Image: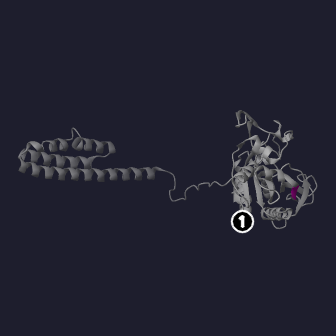
Amino acid sequence: MSESFEQLNKYQVDSLHETSEAATPEALDAVHLKYLGRKEGLLTQLLQTLPSLPPDQRKELGRKANEAKRALESALAEKKQSLESARLTKTLSETAEDLTLPGTPLVRGGLHPLTKVEEDIVAVFQRLGFNVAEGPEVETDDNNFTALNHPPDHPARDSHDTFYLKSHKDAAGAPLLLRTHTSPVQIRYMKTHKPPLYIVAPGRVFRHEAVDATHSFVFHQVEGLAVDEGISLADLKGALTLFAREMFGGSAEVRFRPSYFPFVEPGIEVDISCAFCSGKGCRVCKNTGWVEMLGAGLVHPNVLRGVGLDPGKFSGYAFGIGVERVAMFKYGVDDMRLFYENDVRFLRQFR
């Protein structure tokens, strides 16, 4: 009994002394391993002898050994904190940086200008009661052309205008394609919903076009559709006039011109006064003072019949807005390619 206690007292005194003398984290780890190591630690081995002692000696020695172990663990933790604090103080004293100076500010990101404009367009029509609808970018020929009253020989079906996925076909064996407009969304929506219908369909579209200042093979559209009883051209003109003035300011001038699109009758094109020259005439507007902004019209009766709606009872209007075109005139950008080059200096202007 006395020998075990003497050994314990020695371990306790020596371990605390060696802990206080440790000058490095490595030396401190060595003290921990020497006395508290799982297999060869001196205090650990002493505790392993307890089962061989008589019960009364076992209890007393076990209590004192555990007290010594806790005292050593506390001393080791305190010394470790002291060494770490000393290391940090030394490092800070040797650095040339002024730590009282404010840190380098983080540069915040922002929405891409096309995303912002698309959201702004959608928000205008949401305030008018329109819902947002979406559809796939890979479409069937039927949804993209046939259901939208495109005749079989329409030039838009040609491969030089449309990207066909010849290795992917629909149920009838016709090749799938990358949608050329977001109008197929209105077909999908009318097939699964009943009037009254008021939707906008934002999304990316694809056309086989050469890239230049005003054209791209991939761009963005917001398709709009309203189908109800008694809808007239006056309703369409009112909605689009409101849209133009919400996007370009209350002073924006709007004009409507007759045009042709297979899926509407009558069809119109909407122009706005040129934002670059305030309607005086410039290179962008080809000296006319007007810039074409979007196409629209009343939904063709054949389109309504194709989705099971009676054109004698229901009428509607549809429009397609080019997001890039709106962004160009909203922000005064005269080259569409700038939106796709990801030049941070350019994009930073729109945060």
**x%, y% of residue 165?**
73, 35
User: On the picture, is 21 further left or further right than 232?
Assistant: left
User: On the picture, is 151 further left or further right than 137?
Assistant: right
Q: What residue is drawn where x is 94% and y is 56%?
A: 288
* Residue underneath mark 1: 127
**x%, y% of residue 70?**
22, 52
Residue 56 lies in the magenta stretch: no
Query: Which of 260/210 is in front?
Result: 260
From which residue to which does the magenta span run?
Answer: 267-271
Q: Quadrant of residue 179?
A: top right
**x%, y% of residue 210?**
82, 39
User: Hey, what amino acid is under mark 1?
Assistant: Arg
Query: Which of 172/137 is in front?
Result: 172
* Residue farthest to the top, as pictured: 167
Query: Which of 181/188 is in front?
Result: 188
**The C terminus sits in image quarter:** bottom right
Tell me, yes or no, if residue 132 can be seen here. Answer: yes
Query: Which of 21/104 is in front?
Result: 104
**x%, y% of residue 131?**
69, 59
Tell me, yes or no, if residue 332 can be seen here. Answer: no
* Residue farthest to the bottom, as pictured: 250
Q: What residue is drawn where x is 73% and y is 59%?
A: 195
Q: Is residue 116 above or below residue 340?
A: below
Q: Exactly how many numbered labels are in the figure?
A: 1
The secondary structure that dominates the magenta segment is strand
SS type, badge 1: loop
